[in-house]
Amino acid sequence: MPPSTLKPVPAPSLSALALRQSQIPALRRLAIEETNNAVIILGRVPSYYLKQLAQEAVMPTLAGRKLLNRVTVTPELPQTSE
């Protein structure tokens, strides 16, 4: 039998899970990039309030790393509820 060609999918990080488990749809759409030294939040939200909420959700998962909040506030984005 040939070896499987499927590759394992890495488990989401604690930082990514913090956003995915949010009650706020806009936060669940944000992306996380991580290095040994930093956690970076990326994406767009319709308000500065949501940008701050994303940062607050991720902060407990930093484990000594820097947080870089690169979320862009785009007020014209619709605030949809999913």
Image: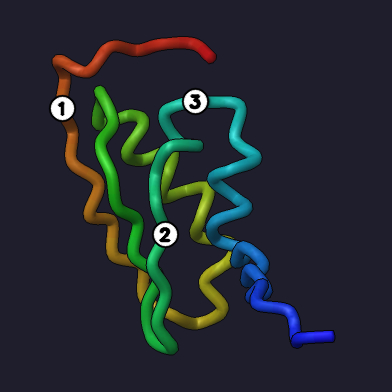
Q: In x, y percent, where is residue 13?
A: 60, 66
The Cα atoms of the two marked residues, 2 and 3, are separated by 15 Å
The answer to whether residue 51 is above or below residue 31 is above
Residue 25 is marked as: 3
> Is disc 3 placed on a helix, strand or loop?
helix
Q: Do the residues labelled 2 and 3 touch (CB within 8 Å)?
A: no
Residue at 65% x, 77% y is 5
Decide: few, some or many residues near mark 1? Use Cα within 10 Å; few <14, some 14-19, many ≥20.
few
Q: Which quarter of the figure has residue 1?
A: bottom right
Residue 32 is marked as: 2
Residue 24 is marked as: none
The Cα atoms of the two marked residues, 1 and 2, are separated by 18 Å
Q: Which amino acid does label 2 sit on?
A: Ile
Q: What residue type is labelled 3?
A: Pro
Mark 1 lies on residue: 74
Residue at 76% x, 86% y is 2
Q: On the picture, is 38 further left or further right than 77?
A: right
The answer to whether residue 10 is above or below residue 65 is above
Q: On the picture, is 11 further left or further right than 2?
A: left
> Is disc 1 placed on a helix, strand or loop?
loop
Q: Which amino acid does label 1 sit on?
A: Thr
Q: In x, y percent, where is residue 52?
A: 35, 40
- Residue, far right: 1
Tag 1 or tag 3, which sits nearer the N-term? 3
